[in-house]
Image (cartoon, rainbow, N blue to C red):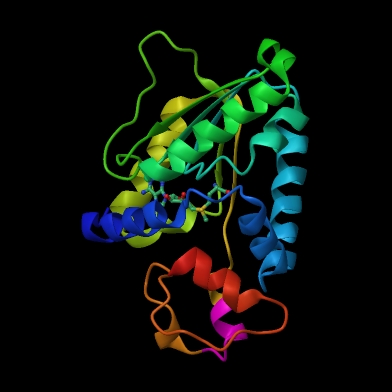
């Protein structure tokens, strides 16, 4: 894992978790944003995967969980316990806040769903182990973040070792990522647009379908 790249990624996502993420203004801005239709599509893809592979599973480990954007999908799929790990402490704070807010709104939910969120900067660096004695996970997921581990081959291998170490025999790993080649081709095939790990190197003009805005958000 290239630790300098990882640090830039962490700083980006720490800035990206604004305090007003859930305010009316924040919600309206996102819904009117160019990337909104693509975000809806991504959410539907994640939902289909989780509803198919994580249905009623006892334990799910989400690697790079962000601000807990999949909270409602985990609950809807009937998962009983989720542990979410992410590089960005601010994203983790926001995930915890959203989880607590959901429990406040639905006090009975706590009887059938629990979640813990922890910052972690070691997923592509060394072994991540749960607390001693904890059972392994039935599902390990990594949604729209696996591309960050492709920075080096060693980092990617370590990431998959962590998937393997924590997954029950017969369990599933599910993951999603943007198609970098397709995205580059859509932007005119400019090789200099994207760095080796999908970082946006040069801004492109926004497109009507919002693709550019989404790439900016995922890669900048
Ligand atoms: C596009 S967001 C996706 C968040 C969430 N999985 C979702 O689908 O809503 C990418 C996330 O990957 C996290 N991330 C990037 N590199 C990481 C690493 N090396 N270890 C853990 N998390 C990482 C970022 O902090 C960010 O929250």
Q: Which quadrant: the C terminus?
A: bottom left
In this rendering, position of residue 206 left or right of residue 96 = right
Q: How many marks?
A: 0
- In the image, 190 versus 90, the foreground residue is 90
**With respect to residue 74, does 34 lie above or below?**
below
Range of residues picked out in magenta: 183-189
Answer yes or no: is residue 119 visible: yes
Residue 105: quadrant of the picture: top right
Q: Is residue 211 above or below residue 161?
A: below
Residue sitting at x 65%, y 64%: 29
Horizontal side of residue 14 vs 64, given as left or right: left
| Residue 46 highlighted magenta (yes or no) | no
Front-most of 187 and 179? 187
Front-lying residue, 190 or 22: 22
Q: Could you tell me which residue is drawn at 40 percent across and 87 percent down?
A: 192
Q: Residue furthest left?
A: 4
When asked about the image quadrant of residue 165, the answer is top left
Q: Position of residue 96 (x, y in %)?
A: 50, 31
Q: Is residue 203 above or below residue 63?
A: below
Q: Is residue 139 visible?
A: no
Image location (x, y in percent) of residue 114: 60, 19
Task: Please check the rendered image and state whether residue 185 is part of the magenta-colored stretch, yes or no.
Answer: yes
Q: At 70% from the left edge and 36% from the top edge, which residue is drawn?
A: 72
Could you tell me which residue is drawn at 46 percent across and 84 percent down? 203
Tell me where residue 145 appears, x and y as whole percent: 49, 53
Q: Is residue 73 left or right of residue 5?
A: right
Question: Which x, y percent locates residue 100?
Answer: 57, 26
Q: Measured along the vertical axis of the image, is residue 4 above or below residue 136?
A: below
Foreground: 56 or 10? 10
């Amino acid at each position: 894992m290239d630790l300098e790249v990882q640090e830039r990624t962490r700083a980006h996502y720490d800035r990206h978790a604004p305090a007003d993420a859930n305010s009316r203004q924040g919600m309206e801005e996102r819904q009117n944003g160019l990337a909104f239709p693509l975000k809806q599509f991504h959410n539907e893809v994640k939902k289909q995967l989780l509803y198919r592979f994580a249905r009623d599973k006892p334990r799910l480990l989400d690697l790079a969980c962000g601000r807990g954007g999949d909270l409602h999908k985990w609950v809807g799929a009937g998962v009983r316990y989720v542990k979410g790990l992410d590089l960005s402490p601010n994203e983790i704070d926001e995930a915890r806040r959203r989880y607590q807010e959901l429990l406040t709104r639905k006090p009975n939910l706590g009887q059938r769903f629990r979640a813990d969120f922890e910052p972690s900067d070691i997923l592509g660096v060394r072994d991540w182990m749960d607390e001693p004695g904890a059972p392994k996970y039935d599902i390990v997921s990594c949604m729209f973040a696996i591309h960050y581990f492709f920075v080096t081959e060693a980092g990617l291998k370590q990431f998959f070792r962590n998937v393997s170490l924590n997954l029950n025999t017969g369990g599933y790993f599910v993951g999603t990522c943007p198609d970098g080649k397709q995205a580059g081709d859509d932007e005119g095939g400019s090789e200099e647009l994207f760095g080796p790990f999908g970082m946006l190197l040069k801004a492109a003009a926004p497109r009507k379908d919002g693709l550019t805005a989404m790439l900016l958000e995922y890669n900048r």
